[in-house]
Image: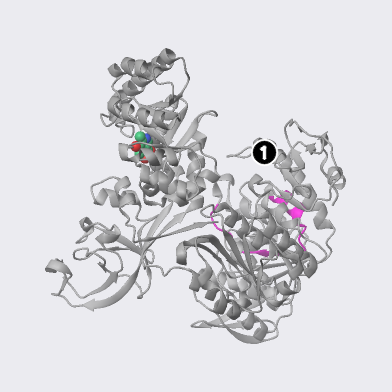
Amino acid sequence: MKLSQIFELIDGEYLSIGIDHDIAHLMTDSRKAFDLESGLFFAIDGLHHDGHSFIPELIKAGFQNFVVEKEIEAFSEKINIIKVASSVRALQAIAEAKRALFNKHVVAITGSNGKTIIKEWLAQMLSEKQNICKSPKSFNSQIGVPLSVWPLSDAHDLGIFETGISEPGEMTSLKRVIQPTHGILTNIGSAHEQYFTSIEQKLDEKLILFEAIDQLYYCNDNPLINEGIGRMKKPPKHKTSWGFNSEADLQVAKKEGSFFILKSKTETFTLKLHSVNETYVENIMHCICFAYFNGWSPSEIQKGIDALRPIKMRLELKKGINQTYIIDDTYNNDLAGLEIALDFLSQQKHYPQKSLILSDIPQSAPKESTYARVAELVQEKDITQLYAIGSELADFKSLFPSSTKFYPTTEDFLQHSTDNFEKEVVLIKGARSFGFEQIAKQLTERIHRTVLEIDLDAVTHNLNVYRQQLKADTKLLIMVKALAYGSGGSEIAHLLQFHKVDYLGVAYVDEAVQLRKAGINLPIMVINPSEEDLPNLVTYNIEPEIYSFAQLKVFSEFYMKKGIELKGHFTINTGMNRLGFDPEDLEALVNEIKHLPHVKVQSLYTHLAASDEAEHKSFSLQQLQTFKAYAEKVEQQLGIKTIKHALNSAGIVAYSEYQFDMVRLGIGLYGIEPSGNLQHELKSISTLKTVISQIRNVKKGETIGYGRKGKVTKNMRIATIAIGYADGFSRIFSNGNGEVMLNGQMAKVIGNVCMDMTMIDISNIEAEEGDTVIIFGEKPTISDLAKKAKTIPYEILTNVSDRVKRVYFAE
Ligand SMILES: *Cc1c(COP(=O)(O)O)cnc(C)c1O
C-alpha cells in the first residue's frame, strides 16, 4: 500500500509531507522500527510510554513515516507525518482495509483461556497443507490484532487470529478488523471480571465476534454458553459443537485412559490423546472438532495431534558452552516468529557477536519474497554469522552475506560446526522437521538440576511500576550490587541499559568492572571503592562514592596525576552512620573542594536508615530535612547544581515528595516492596526450582538424614530433592520449618537440610521422580522464606549460590 492510499483510509492531516513510499510494515514499538522508508510508525500515548517521545530519535535514525496524535516537528523535509485523532483507530482502519482485500477464509478465536494454544496447534496441524497467516504469540489486543492482520496477503490460504477483550465495547472494533468467516469459542471463565457487570454480559460481548459468520465451533457442555449463543441477534449461519453430551455434533462417547471414543452423526472412531489433563483435552478437542468438520479423516487427525509440539509461550536465554548464550526457539519457523526471536536476540548485548542458526521456512509462498525478507532481517538485526540449514536457503544463496555457511541437513551441521561457538549470543530457530533441539542440546550447558529462573518481563514490569511513582524529571539509579541481588548482574544490567535508566549502582569496583566487560556503558556509581581500585576506576570510567577526607585526598591526588576529572558522589551521613561526611564536616569539605578544580561533585546523597518502617517516620523525615538543608548549602557555597538523591525502594513509596533529582531503586525491582504498600503491583521475578532425585517409602520408627533428626512417626513417602544449604537453602529450614511446593501442594522438610540435598515428606502428594519442586517463587514467596528464616528477603535472594544456574526468559 502506498502511504497516500493509507492517508485516504485514516481521516488525518499531513503535518509534513515527503516521498509517497510503499508501506510494507506497521509498527508501534520504537525499538522494532527498522524499515526506514517502508515502515510506518504509530505513536501511541500508552500507560508506560508515550510513543511520541521516541519520534526525534527515530527521525535521527532515518525513519521516515509516522502517524501521530500530537503536534510534532519534522526537522527535515523528507519526513511524512500524519496527524489523526487516534493512532490506534487509524491502525485498525488500515488493517481493516487490508483484510477486505483477502477473499479466503479467516478463523477468529476468542474465549477466556486456551486461545493462543488452540491457535498455534491449529496452525501447526493445518500448515501441513496450507499457508497460514496467524497472530504472532498472543497478539490479541486492540493493537495486537491489527498488527497481526496486516501481513495477510494473496500468498496465504487461511488466516487464524485470536482476540482478547478486557472492557465492554472492545469487540466491535476487533470484529471490523478481522471480519471472520469462521469462529472458535474456547470457553468462558472469570478473568477480566472487573469491567463487566456479569458473566453473561462478558459472554455477549465476546459473541459479537461471531455475529453472522458462516460457521462457529464451540463446546456445548456449558449451558451458559448455549444460552448466550441462543441470545445472539445475528447468530452464525452454522454451528457445530463438541461435548461430552449426546446433543453434541461430535460427542466424546467414552474414555478409556487416553483413548477417546468419538461419535458423530455418521461414524464412531477412536483417537489416542497425549494427556488426560482437563485443559489439554479441552484445547485439543476444539482442534479435532475443527479438523473433523473440515474434512479430515480420523487417521489424518491422529497424525496431526501426534506431531504437535508443546507451545513455548516465551523465549529463554540460557547459558551455553564456551561462555555463549543460547536462545532456543526450535519448534517452528515462520517469518513473524523469526522477527520476534531476532528482536529478542538484538536486545541481548552481552557480546557483539550474534549468530543465527536457521532452517528453511517450510510452506512459505512465494519463496522468493520470503527469503528476500529473511536476508533483509539478517542485515537489519546485525547478525554476524548466519548458519543456513536446508536446501531452500541454499537455493537463495545469492541473497545472503558471503560469510554465510550452508549445510544440507541438521546432521551435517552437527558434524561440522558446534565446537566453534565462543563468547557470542546464538539464536537457534528452526522448523519442526529439522530437529533443531539436537543443536540446542549440544550448545547448552548441562543444567545442574537446580535453577533460578528470572522473568525479564517481570523485571520490566516492576521497573515501570516504579517509573510511574516518579516525577517526570526524576532520574533513576538502579542498584545492581551483589549480582543484581542474586539475579545475575550483567543480564539485568543489559535489560536496564535497554530501558535507558540513568545510572547503575554497585557496592564494589570489581562488580562495576564486570559490568563494563560485559558491555554496559551506563554511568556506574560505586559505593565502597578503595585505594587499590583506583586504576580500575579510571580505566573503566567508574564513578566513586567519596565519604571521608582521607579518601578524598588519596583519590584526588591520583586523578590529578592522571590529569583527569574525578566525578565523585559525596555522601552525607544523616543518621545511618555507615559511610559519609557528617553535616558539621561539610563546611570544611566545601573549602577543600574549592581548591581541587579537577574534582567534580557529580552528586550529593544520603541513605535512610529505616525507610521501610512506619514507626521511624519522624526519624526518616528528619534525615531528609537535614539532607535537604545541607545539600542545598553545599550547592550554594560551591555555586553549582548537582544531582541530589536520598530514596531507596521503600523510600520511593513512603516519602515520594523527597525524590530530589534522582532515586536509588534496589529490591523493589526484584519484586519485593519492603513497606508492603506497593507489593500487590509488583511481579515476582525469580523462581528457584529443583527436582526430585529419588522417592522412597519409610516405615514408622525409622529416621531421616544426618543426626537422625527426622523422626518417622507413621509409614511415610519421602522425596529427596537436589538442593541443599550450599545452594542457598539454609539449614534453618530443617525439620519441618521449611516448606516447598510440589505439584500444587506444600511439602514439609523432614530431617536436617544437607549440603547438597534435602528430604521432604510427600506422603499426601502424588509425585514422581524427576518432578519439579519450587523452593521460592509465586508460592512460597521469598518473603515467606525470610519469615521462617527470621531474616529479610534481601538475604534469601542474595544467598542463592553461584553453582545454581540462572535461566532468563521473556515473552
Ligand atoms: C542497596 C542500596 C540501595 C537500595 O536499597 P533497596 O532497599 O534495595 O531499595 C540504595 N542506596 C544505597 C546506598 C544502597 O546501598
Asked if one can make out residue 762 in the rendered structure from this viewpoint, the answer is no
For the residue marked with disc 1, what is the amino acid? Glu
Q: Residue furthest front?
A: 561
Residues rendered magenta in the picture: 171-191
Taking the spot 54% from the left edge, 82% from the top edge, the residue there is: 254
Q: Nearer the viewer, residue 789 or 504?
A: 504
At mark 1, the secondary structure is helix
Q: Nearer the viewer, residue 200 or 41?
A: 41
State how the image is colored: one colour
For disc 1, the marked residue is 57
Counting from the top left corner in percent of width and height, residue 489 is at 42, 49
Counting from the top left corner in percent of width and height, residue 504 is at 45, 39
Counting from the top left corner in percent of width and height, residue 290 is at 68, 73
Q: Quadrant of ligand 1?
A: top left
Taking the spot 50% from the left edge, 57% from the top edge, the residue there is: 809
Does residue 585 appear left or right of residue 369 in this picture? left
Q: Is residue 294 above or below residue 586?
A: below
